[in-house]
Image (tube, coloured by chain):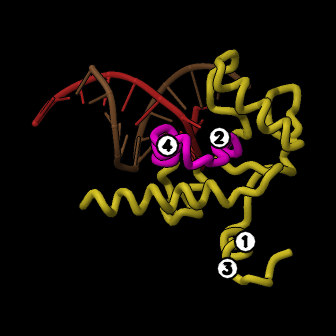
Chain colours: A yellow, B red, C brown
Amino acid sequence: MTVTEDEARLARIREAVAAIPRGRVDSYGGVARRAGLPGRARLVGHALRTAPTELDLPWHRVVNASGRISFPSGSRQHALQRRLLAGEGVRFGDDGRVDPAARGLDDDLDRLLWGPPDGGR
DNA sequence: AACTTGACTAATC
DNA sequence: CGATTAGCCAAGT
């Protein structure tokens, strides 16, 4: 297990995060699955935590499997993430869950977005 | 090197 | 609903 392999995995995770369209969210597990790393949701958390800000990843579009922001409510991060999502039109329920309609992505999303130059849109 | 933590999750109770 | 358990495993102590 080399360092380069780890970096490649992190890169795939970051790609998967970057592939989440504006106004939609995905779960840590979902991102991991689309990155080819099923069952490794925690790794997504680590990847985002250690990701350089300069990458400008849409990290706020990643919520937990419950559809809630994973930062403790009341924390600065929680407020920020919620605000960023609200700014993209993501609705929240009274229980703090994001609108179910905005949750989850198809496995083909990556191909749809990055594959066929003409397929999508 | 042992032990703990954590931007997680699914299953059970 | 919440609490517990077990699986996950990179990083931090």
The answer to whether C8 is drawn above or below residue B4 in the figure is below
Whether label 1 touches label 3, CB < 8 Å: yes
Label number found at residue A64:
2
Residue, x 62% and y 54% (percent of image)?
A17
Q: Distance between the Cα atoms at labels 4 and 1?
A: 24 Å
The answer to whether C3 is drawn above or below residue A3 in the figure is above
Chain of the residue where label 4 is placed in the rendered structure = A
Q: Quadrant of the N terminus of chain A?
A: bottom left
Label number found at residue A84:
none
Neighbourhood count class around disc 2 (C-alpha, 10 Å): few under 14, some 14–19, many 20 upward: some
Q: Distance between the Cα atoms at labels 2 and 3?
A: 27 Å
- Provide the residue designation for mark 4: A52
- Residue A44 lies, in percent from the top left, at 51, 48
Q: Which residues are magenta?
A: A43-65
Chain of the residue where label 3 is placed in the rendered structure = A
- Provide the residue designation for mark 3: A115
Per the picture, the main secondary structure of the magenta-coloured stretch is helix
Q: Quadrant of the C terminus of chain A?
A: bottom right
Q: Please give left or right for residue A54 compared with residue A90 in the image.
A: left
Callout 4 secondary element:
loop
Q: Earlier in the sequence, mark 4 or mark 3?
A: 4
* Marks 4 and 3 share the same chain: yes
Q: Distance between the Cα atoms at labels 2 and 1?
A: 23 Å
| Residue type, numbered disc 4 | Pro
